[in-house]
Image: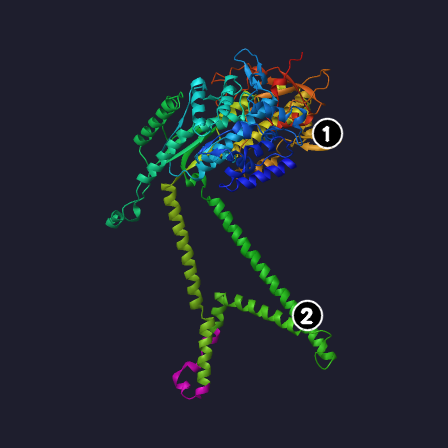
């Protein structure tokens, strides 16, 4: 509590930019790090703490004053924790870790564990090193996040895949040519790390901070592989710091693209008014040249609107040259090709993009739908008429009751003698009824026309020789009466008003139709589709379906418990639904989930219990309910109602898909002593050992063969195959459902159990 009060004092002092240099001393900041933190820092507090070390347009002493402070390490532990509440002091001492970092005695190599395999070994950090890496990531995020360009996505708060897709769907208009930059699979080498550290030193003048990042790469605890399929997938060979470092490495390239976009927008002048006056008129549609760019980690998409193909080719050459010469990256020039946005599809962020007219995204109503809508409107009018008639009938009955009551009172007494006065209320009721009846009567053309005809037809007072024989008062009264009849009951004016209203509505619909037709012919938007062929290939690869495309049981899941089988299917189903919910053909994904995955799970359960599909459905139901020891049911697989209601209304950054799809863990029946759960900061000892089984090893498929493997689907490192680790019940549940990934557990504690 005292630490939080001191931190608030620091924030209050640093809120004034002119006073923090003189009043906030390093001694005071160091004194706050000696106390036991109790609550994690907020983003504002962390940013304020980082800004206290900002002098002369550079950040200094970030290791000494920020990373090595117990509040920051406590916040980093809280970020990677999988339990709440958690107690980091039960695993290591924050103050001793802070002292090691402050004195530059922290040994990175001693906190790494190498897992051997047939291929290259996998180096994983232990829990203490993961806290330090998270603290470094938090500091770099506070330094650089607001300095990145707007089209930089990935590794940033609130700027994930769905945010990038929303930008492509809503902001990119009339794309003509676009291309995606493809990299050859290669890892960050020594030259890339030196260049990255050089970029960091432009803003961070802290040698210890940069040396710590270099040690991460030297010990291979940080591995960045461009052109692969492991970035942003939640695999253990990747960590959250990689995303921030990639954004820093591409920051200079992003700013060059931003300058190119601004320059093209300035050069695109509006159409000269003299050309419009010379006879071009409204048939000329001017589309200025614009450049759009989106980058998600190492995936780059650049599109042009209104420009020629030569312009797009020149832009591609400059982009490739900047990446190869400026960043020393290996660009796959064969796959980095220009595509027509209208006639060709392009793959980006695991989805397919194409420019289509508005009528494709929002198709007009069919004739059947129009007839159904008109029928609904007619039924609505009939219901409204019935309601009005019922209301008039009720009013008439109520009025008769009131008059009957008044008549009885008058017969029983000499006048109105009530205990309470209702004359005012009755008068207001009748007045409101009269107003409504008059408005309804005057709004009906047929009734007004009938009354006007009956009051004006055959009047002998309109004859001149008769008017001369009558008194002037009678003639004037008759003329005034006729004026009032023409004023209120003449249907010509009312009919003219109705006709004008109908004509305006018709003109409005015609203008709307013409505008929609012109926009449909001249405006193109980005349609985002799920790669149906790849999804179906993944369904066949994992053996959800047979060669006929029908659901089938999966044999390597028969060793799991019933609840674990359902959770394994539920993790894949929910991640696919979350990942592809922004796509235009989301119905196909919903069909695959609600039919192939659901019935494959039912058939797997039936195969395990040697029963039929009908018996499995009768026991588990179509929603795949599981009952615990207390008899309470839980539904993990998405229900049919939930699947129908999913869509792109509430988008969020989708969770990794391949972490659950290519992983299965089998419970072991062993007599191992109670062991602590290896999930981050979980101190439960009621654990069970589970063995890891990887998909590529179970199917005997080489992920490097594109013909057999699904393009774009990541692969978990082979060193974890057949490894065993203890997990408690809660974290096994979260791992199956995809709430946590292999990054959220301490894989260095994996063991080999026979």
Image quadrant holding the C terminus, namely top right
Q: Name the mark on residue 433.
A: none
Image quadrant holding the N terminus, namely top right
Principal secondary structure, stretch drawn in magenta? helix
Report the span colored magenta: 454-473
Which residue occupies the foreground of this view, 462 or 176?
176
Query: Visible in this render: residue 400?
Result: yes
Which residue occupies the foreground of this view, 216 or 669?
216
Secondary structure beneath disc 2? Answer: helix
Q: Is residue 479 above or below residue 209?
A: below
Q: Is 673 left, or right, of 45 in this rendering?
A: right
Q: Is 396 left, or right, of 345 in this rendering?
A: right
Q: Residue at x 41, y 52 (%)?
A: 509
The residue wearing badge 1 is 628
| Mark 1 nearby-residue class (10 Å; few <14, some 14–19, many ≥20) | few
* Marks 2,1: beta carbons within 8 A: no
Of labels 2 and 1, earlier in sequence is 2
Q: Give the quarter of the image for residue 427.
A: bottom right
Which residue occupies the foreground of this view, 709 or 440?
709
Q: Residue at x 45, y 32 (%)?
A: 58
Q: Is residue 580 above or below residue 678?
A: below
Query: Visible in this render: residue 544?
Result: no
Q: Is 656 left, or right, of 615 in this rendering?
A: left
The scheme the figure's colours follow is rainbow
The residue wearing badge 2 is 401
Secondary structure beneath disc 1? Answer: loop
Measured from the top left, where is residue 603 in percent x and y? Answer: 64, 24
User: How far apart, in angstroms, are the residues tagged by discs 2 and 1?
Assistant: 65 Å
Confirm whether the magenta stretch covers residue 437.
no
Q: Is residue 471 above or below residue 30?
A: below
């Amino acid at each position: 509590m005292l630490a939080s009060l001191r931190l608030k004092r620091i924030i209050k002092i640093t809120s004034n930019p002119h006073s923090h240099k003189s009043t906030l001393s390093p001694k005071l900041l160091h004194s706050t790090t000696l106390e036991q933190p109790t609550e994690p820092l907020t983003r504002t507090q962390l940013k304020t703490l980082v800004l206290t070390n900002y002098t002369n347009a550079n950040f200094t002493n970030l290791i000494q004053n920020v990373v090595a402070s117990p509040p920051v390490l406590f916040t980093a532990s809280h970020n990677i924790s999988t339990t709440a509440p958690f107690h980091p002091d039960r695993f290591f001492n924050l103050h001793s870790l802070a002292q090691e970092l402050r004195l530059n005695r922290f040994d990175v190599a001693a906190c790494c564990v190498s897992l051997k395999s047939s291929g290259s070994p996998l180096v994983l950090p232990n829990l203490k090193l993961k806290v330090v890496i998270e603290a470094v990531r938090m500091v770099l995020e506070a330094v650089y996040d607001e300095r990145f360009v707007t089209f930089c996505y990935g590794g940033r708060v609130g700027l994930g895949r769905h945010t990038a897709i929303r930008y492509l769907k809503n902001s990119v208009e009339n794309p003509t040519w676009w291309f995606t930059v493809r990299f050859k699979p290669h890892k960050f080498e020594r030259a890339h790390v030196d260049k990255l550290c050089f970029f960091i030193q432009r803003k961070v003048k802290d040698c210890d901070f940069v040396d710590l990042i270099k040690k991460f790469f030297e010990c291979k605890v940080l591995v960045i592989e461009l052109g692969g399929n492991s970035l942003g997938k939640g695999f253990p060979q990747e960590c959250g710091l990689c995303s921030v470092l990639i954004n820093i490495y591409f920051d200079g390239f992003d700013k060059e693209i931003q300058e190119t976009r601004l320059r093209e927008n300035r050069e695109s002048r509006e159409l000269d008014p003299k050309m419009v006056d010379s006879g071009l008129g409204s048939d000329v549609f001017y589309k200025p040249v614009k450049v759009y760019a989106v980058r998600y980690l190492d995936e780059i998409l650049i599109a042009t609107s209104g420009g020629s193909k030569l312009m797009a080719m020149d832009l591609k050459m400059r982009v490739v040259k900047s990446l190869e010469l400026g960043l020393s990256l290996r660009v796959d020039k064969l796959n980095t090709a220009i595509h027509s946005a209208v006639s060709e599809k392009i793959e980006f962020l695991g989805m397919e993009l194409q420019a289509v007219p508005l009528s494709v995204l929002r198709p007009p109503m069919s004739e059947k739908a129009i007839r159904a809508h008109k029928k609904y409107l007619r039924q609505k009018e009939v219901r409204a008429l019935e309601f009005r008639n019922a209301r008039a009938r009720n009013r008439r009955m109520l009025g008769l009751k009131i008059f009957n009551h008044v008549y009885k009172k008058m017969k029983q007494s000499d006048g109105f003698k009530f205990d309470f006065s209702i004359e005012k209320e009755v008068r207001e009721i009748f007045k409101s009824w009269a107003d409504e009846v008059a408005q309804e009567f005057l709004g009906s053309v047929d009734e007004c026309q009938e009354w006007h005809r009956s009051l004006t037809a055959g009047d002998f007072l309109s004859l001149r020789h008769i008017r001369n024989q009558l008194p002037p008062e009678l003639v004037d009264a008759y003329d005034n009466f006729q004026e009032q009849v023409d004023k209120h009951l003449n249907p010509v004016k009312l009919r003219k008003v109705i006709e004008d209203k109908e004509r305006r509505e018709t003109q409005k619909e015609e203008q709307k139709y013409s505008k929609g037709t012109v926009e449909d012919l001249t405006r193109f938007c980005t349609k985002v589709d799920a790669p149906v062929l790849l999804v179906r290939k993944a369904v066949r690869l994992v053996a959800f379906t047979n060669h006929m495309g029908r659901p089938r049981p999966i044999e390597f899941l028969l060793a799991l418990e019933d609840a674990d089988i359902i959770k394994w299917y539920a993790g894949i189903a929910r991640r696919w639904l979350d990942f592809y919910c922004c796509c235009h053909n989301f119905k196909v994904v919903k069909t695959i989930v609600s039919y192939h995955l659901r019935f494959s799970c039912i058939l797997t359960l039936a195969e395990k219990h040697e029963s039929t599909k009908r018996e499995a459905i009768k026991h588990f139901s179509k929603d795949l309910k599981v009952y615990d020891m207390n008899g309470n049911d839980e539904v993990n697989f998405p229900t049919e109602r939930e699947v129908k209601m999913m869509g792109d209304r509430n988008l969020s950054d989708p969770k990794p898909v391949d972490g659950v799809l290519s992983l299965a863990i089998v419970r072991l029946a062993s007599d191992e002593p109670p062991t602590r759960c290896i999930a981050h900061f979980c101190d439960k000892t009621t654990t069970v050992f589970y063995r890891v089984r990887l998909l590529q090893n179970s199917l005997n498929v080489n992920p490097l063969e594109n013909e057999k493997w699904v393009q774009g689907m990541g692969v978990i490192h082979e060193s974890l195959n057949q490894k065993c680790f203890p997990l408690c019940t809660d974290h096994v549940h979260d791992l199956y459902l995809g709430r946590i990934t292999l990054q959220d557990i301490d894989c260095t504690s994996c063991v080999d159990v026979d």
